[in-house]
Each structure stands twice: as C-alpha cells, then as structure tokens.
Amino acid sequence: MTYCVGMVLDKGLVLMSDTRTNSGVDNISVFRKMFHWSVPGERQITIMTAGNLATTQAVISQLEERNKAPSDRRPSVLEAPTMFQVATLVGNLLRSVIERRQEGGMQSEGPRFTASIIVAGQIKDMEPRLFMVYPEGNFIEASFDTPFFQIGETKYGRPILLRGYDRTMSFEDAVKLMMVSFDSTLAANLSVGLPLDLMVMERDRFEPLHQRRILASDPYFKSISSSWSEALRQAFHSLPDYTFAQDGEQVTES
C-alpha cells in the first residue's frame, strides 16, 4: 500500500508521496512513487503512483522510454499539447499494461495487478491541472468541489485535509497540512512509511519551486508529529466533560 496526495491551490500544485512498498510485515522496501519531467519554459509534469509495483513500474518505464527518444516512441508526455491529453496518454498506457497482464494468464489474480495514478502539471499558456487516473484508464479532474486527490491508503489522512484545506493558502501552509495528514496515516497504518517525497509546482514556473525528500530524521517533520500529537491531547482535555447524570439529577456512587 502507499499514500499520495495531489492538491490544487490558487498559486499552483502541491504533491506528496510516501515510498514504502511491502508484501508482508517481513518484506518492506523503499521505492520512489513520484516522477517528474519538465521542459524549461514550456511545461512540467509530475506523476504519482499507487498499486501493484510491477504495474506502475511498467507504466513509468514506458513513459521514460518515450521521453528519451520521442521521435521513435510516440506519443510522449513531453509532446502532448494539453494536460488533458497527457492524462489520456497515461490512462491508455495504464489500461494496456493491466490488460496485457490479465491476458497473460493472470486473470484469477486480477485485482493484484491494478494501480491508480495522479497526474499533475502545467503547459505554457494553460492552467495548472490535476487528474486522478483509474485502473480502467478513465480519469477525473480536480475542481473547486474536489480540489485534491488521494490514492492508496486514504482514509486516515483525509479528515485532516477536509478540515484544513483552503484554496488560497500559501504553499508553506499546504505543505504543513500535508505533513499532518501523512503523520496521521503513518501512525495508523504500517503499510505507509518514510521517506516522503515533496513537490511544489508554482503557477507559470516550468520547473519545481521546491522539491525534496523528507527522511525519518527530518527535524521539521519530527516537530510537526510531536506538536500535532500534543495539540490533539490538549484539544481533547479542553472539551466539556461528559457526565452520567441526566437532566440535572445527581449520580450516587454505590
């Protein structure tokens, strides 16, 4: 399992992914799930993947090959005229990879080979766009009603995003919000783990504004984790006390 989040702000796009891949508690590995391509001054595209590792690596490998030799291996995400067509290309490729695996005699294990992908980016003279691509190859786009997407282990970090998200927030606050969301997920699910990969894509800036890997030793992430835990404890203790008495009656101890 994994956890990835892509978020749309007025200022641009913010993305974060974990790196844990496991097939049991005794077989845990680190694999990158965030991939970035750019053409300076013209476009930048980031993809995050969740699901079967062999499936997602096959998709990324084919995208990489097409980008290295676009004249021989078209279509390429570096040549697609719109982000919609980039999402279409990725969706078609994901579907074809899954279908080939199923046609190879893996139908009985079909669900194991599925994957989902977040596609984010901007092409010059167009708006930044964010898509979530499903295993069937179809996709949806982020909007004012759905301003962020999650893939993988989504349930633990989602309440944090729903309560804290604001489209006008700064990049710094968005990163802080994501770190709280990831910290909550890490605390609840062993299949999600550090390091985390972070990407900030500013509107009309066709190279990353900020990009880094967050390790377990990262002082800021450790501060966020401990401060959030303490804030939750303080908030809990500040809530009104519950009493077994009803309608003002006194409770007597036996």
Image (tube, helix red, strand yellow):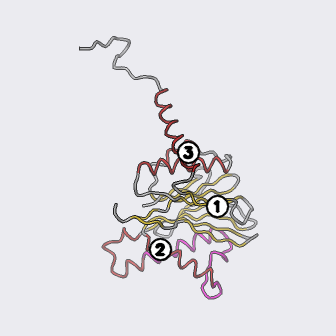
Q: Which residues are magenta?
A: 69-98
First reached walking from the N terminus: tag 1 or tag 2: 2
**Where residue 115 appears, x then y in whole percent?**
45, 67
Within the magenta stretch, is there residue 232? Answer: no
Q: Are marks 2 and 3 in contact (CB under 8 Å)?
A: no
Label of residue 224 in the image? 3
Label 1 SS: strand
Which residue does the image show at 58% across and 60% down from the upper left?
213
Q: Which residue is mark 2?
A: 95
Which residue does the image show at 48% across and 65% down from the upper left?
116
First reached walking from the N terminus: tag 3 or tag 1: 1
How many numbered marks are there?
3
| Viewer-closest of 170 and 233 | 233
> Callout 1, which amino acid?
Gln
Where does the C terminus fall, quadrant-wise? Answer: top left
Viewed as shown, does residue 9 lie left or right of 240?
right
> Callout 2, which amino acid?
Arg
Q: Which residue is mark 1?
A: 211
Residue 62 picture quarter: bottom right
| Viewer-closest of 61 and 123 | 61
Q: Is residue 12 above or below residue 137?
A: above
First reached walking from the N terminus: tag 2 or tag 3: 2
